[in-house]
Image: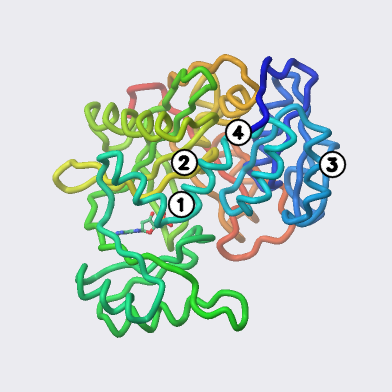
Amino acid sequence: MTNLEKPVPPGGTIGIVGGGQLGRMLAMAAARLGLQTCIFNDAPDAPAFQVTPHHVVAPYEDLAALEAFADRCDAVTFESENLPAHAIARLAQHVWVAPGAEALAITQDRLTEKSFVEKLGLKTAPFREVSSAEQARAAFDDLGGPAILKTRRFGYDGKGQAKVTSAEECVAAFGNFKGAPMQGSMPCILEGFVDFAFEASVVAARARDGAFAAYDPPENLHEHHILRRSTVPGRLTEAQGHQAKAIAHKIAAALDYVGVLAVELFVGHDGGLTVNEIAPRVHNSGHWTIEACQCSQFEQHIRAVAGWPLGSPVRHADAVMENIIGAEADAWESLARSGALHLYGKKAARPGRKMGHVTRLLPRGSK
Ligand code: AMP
């Protein structure tokens, strides 16, 4: 990987691969620090294009376009783990990229991710590799039901997931997860179903020198596999909060991670924490940090990528962040009255599409 010998100074350019709402909020945070951003996106109507004049539109596999983009940037990061790892590796030959290609490769595949977490001695749902119909049957017989079959790659917001309650269902679900035409079923894992009390996450940052800063972990509520609400503080006890931050620290250090990452957790009825997944990027459950903390997750990520000192993650208010999904955005006037409103500038409000979010603050400790 190309080294970053000195921090990127104000006026320098941070490249962001991916121009969705996360890229947009990263670009806005960078601008506040006097840094420029250049966004690489595979379609011309990216929400992030509206907040910075520097863009590249090309497929993520276009190596020549990636190289030309790298030449325009002092450091590069990305807003999604669903990018070809070889594209990030190619960028890294030309420019400092954070997080690194290895962290991306481990976390974008559920099998390598879960194996990595398990090796660190952290708890995960029991899991088995499923690459054939025979393995689908054997995995279900081994784990028992109910269980969840997940594609190893390119799943988000519940896409590429099926709950199964018999070996037959498991085999059928595997048959349904087709890759490109004629390529057969996509490689999957089968996970035992975790009977959790609630879900939580921890968003944290690690700098190049190993400095680490974690935000207070919110409690997260999902509806139809999409995050509906993050509440901080949620039901996590102080001890669980410390444990969640320690889990994020262990994972970030083992990945030699630079930037912000999120660890999604299941909180068991016995109070134990199980790692669900790692997101190698800023995360929806950390959006409340924009208003409630001195340094938001977006600014923190830009600071880490640019080699700046990390900012304070201390939380100054209690907060509830609610996503605005699909046609809910039509009610923008009443939403604007209800809290800190963020709209992402997306034109079409398709069902399930994240259009914005609203954060409501309360004085700290008042909840
Ligand atoms: P994921 O894409 O892995 O984050 O899963 C999306 C959502 O599905 C999670 O936030 C949980 O609500 C649910 N889920 C995923 N895996 C499991 C599991 N092994 N047991 C129970 N619920 C799960």
Which dot, 2 or 4, sits closer to the camera?
4
Give the mark nearer the N terminus: 1 vs 3.
3
- What's the residue type where badge 3 is placed? Ala
Q: Earlier in the sequence, mark 4 or mark 1?
A: 4
Do labels 4 and 1 touch, CB within 8 Å? no
Q: CA distance from mark 2 to mark 4?
A: 21 Å
- CA–CA distance between discs 1 and 3? 36 Å
Of the four image quadrants, the one with ligand 1 is bottom left
Q: Nearer the viewer, mark 4 or mark 1?
A: 4
User: Residue 208: percent from the left, percent from the top?
Assistant: 54, 21
Residue at disc 2, secondary structure: helix
- For marks 2 and 3, give the CA distance: 33 Å
Pointer 4 residue: 98
Residue 131 in view of the camera: yes
Amino acid under label 2?
A: Ser
Residue drawn 61% across and 76% down? 180
> Any mark on residue 227, and which?
1
Q: Secondary structure at mark 4?
A: loop
- The answer to whether residue 316 is seen in the rendering is no
Q: Residue at x 80, y 42 (%)?
A: 67
- For disc 4, the neighbor class at 10 Å (few under 14, some 14 to 19, many from 20) is many
Q: Is residue 186 above or below residue 297?
A: below
Residue matched to label 2: 285
The residue carrying mark 3 has its beta carbon less than 8 Å from ligand 1: no
Location of residue 54 with respect to 163 vertically, above or below: above
Q: What colour scheme was applied to this rendering of the protein?
A: rainbow
- Identify the residue under disc 3: 68
The Cα–Cα distance between marks 3 and 4, rounded to whole angstroms, is: 18 Å
Residue at image position (31%, 28%) is: 246
